[in-house]
Image (cartoon, grey):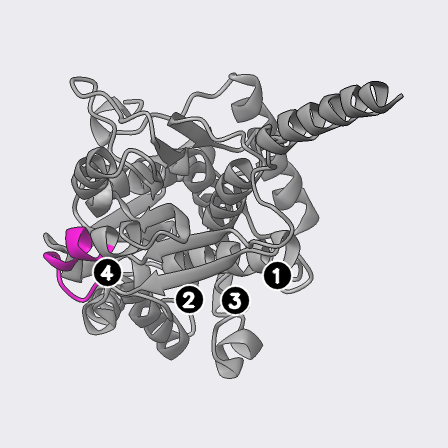
Amino acid sequence: MVNKYISWLIIAVLLMSFYGCSKTPEPATSGSEKMKVGLVFDIGGRGDKSFNDSAYEGLERARKELGIEYEYLETPQATDRATQLRQLARNPEIKLIFGIGFLFTDDINAIAKEFPDKKFACVDYTVDPNKEIPPNVVALKFKEEEGSFLVGALAGLLTKTNKVGFIGGMKIPLIEKFETGYKMGVKYVNPKCVVFANYAGLTGNAFKDPTKGKELALAMYDNGADIIYHASGSTGLGVFEAAFQKKKYAIGVDADQFQTAPKEMQEAHTILTSMVKRVDEAVFQTIKSVQEGQFHGGVHTFDLKSNGIDYVYDANNQSLIPPAVHHQVEMLRDKIIKGEIVVPTTLKDLPK
């Protein structure tokens, strides 16, 4: 009887030992440990009421809906980007690091190789066909030309002077996509319309110069333009000031810029619409993919079809956009989604 008891005791101890050494796979983020995200803003930082603020909205949404924590840093100087990315990567609590803006591309590639156990995401990542994207990096791309085409069509249909304008920040291929789409949209619906175009500069500072934005916009309005579309970060705040001063219209970018405009501009309907680039959605979805263990490196593209690109049409501007005009623009949206209209990304490829 004693031997039998000892035998059962040995079996019990062996079973406890076996199960004690095995580990149940943990979920991507356990309930007791919040996932932490790091983010470095583009030049201009928070408060641009556009590109950077949209990224911040994505962080905030993830905090509220997914329960994550986050830490963010500004980028006052170009040389700070690598330093700040590395600072976040060295934090053992941070699992995912964002660089907001194309200027982060090279630094993200380098830091991602230094920290292969971390995950990185870059909004507007510059894809080089001759270079591989590190496996722990996701390149978040947008078809800005598609949304720019639609606001261009809107401007071409609503202009009273047959003159409209475009103001970009830094003169680079990325911002040229906005100009290209806008020009094609204007000309598609109004071939006789003149489109002025100018840029605030050749460096990153061109995205944070409202004084220059106002100067360029005033010149265009004085030349007869009655609607100006900007793709210039906080430089665009100067475009809005010029539009308000001249009692003309401006078109915002990246976020619904009517919502963050001063009350007097809202009441004057200075901002006709905005081309919405869902940076917030890209940030949120990337965080969610990491939390759920579904992160995959490579290029992720957001366009009209995926609702990653759009333009604003709501109660704040419906009085400015006749139903027939809205219907015409929506038909153009359908044609782009179906592939019946293909919007180029460079000026040289615009239809002659």
* Residue 227 can be seen, yes or no: no
Q: Secondary structure at mark 3?
A: loop
- Amino acid carrying label 4: it is Ile
351 and 136: which is toward the camera: 136
First along the sequence among labels 2 and 3 = 2
207 and 333: which is toward the camera: 207
Q: CA distance from mark 3 to mark 4?
A: 22 Å
- Amino acid carrying label 3: it is Phe
Q: Secondary structure at mark 4?
A: loop
Do residues under tags 3 and 4 come within 8 Å of each other at their CB atoms?
Answer: no
Q: Which residue is mark 2?
A: 49
- Amino acid carrying label 2: it is Lys
Q: Which residue is mark 3?
A: 258
- Amino acid carrying label 1: it is Asn
First along the sequence among labels 2 and 4 = 4
- Residue reaching furthest front? 2
* Residue 331 can be seen, yes or no: yes
Q: Residue at x 21, y 35 (%)?
A: 109
106 and 294: which is toward the camera: 294
Q: Residue at x 54, y 70 (%)?
A: 269
Q: CA distance from mark 3 to mark 1?
A: 9 Å
Of circles 3 and 1, which is in front? 3
13 and 6: which is toward the camera: 6
Q: Quadrant of the C terminus?
A: top left
First along the sequence among labels 1 and 4 = 4
Mark seen at residue 43: 4
Q: Secondary structure at mark 1?
A: loop
Q: Which residue is mark 1?
A: 317
First along the sequence among labels 3 and 1 = 3
* Residue 321 percent location from the top left of the image: 61, 54
Of circles 2 and 3, which is in front? 2
Q: Residue at x 74, y 21 (%)?
A: 11
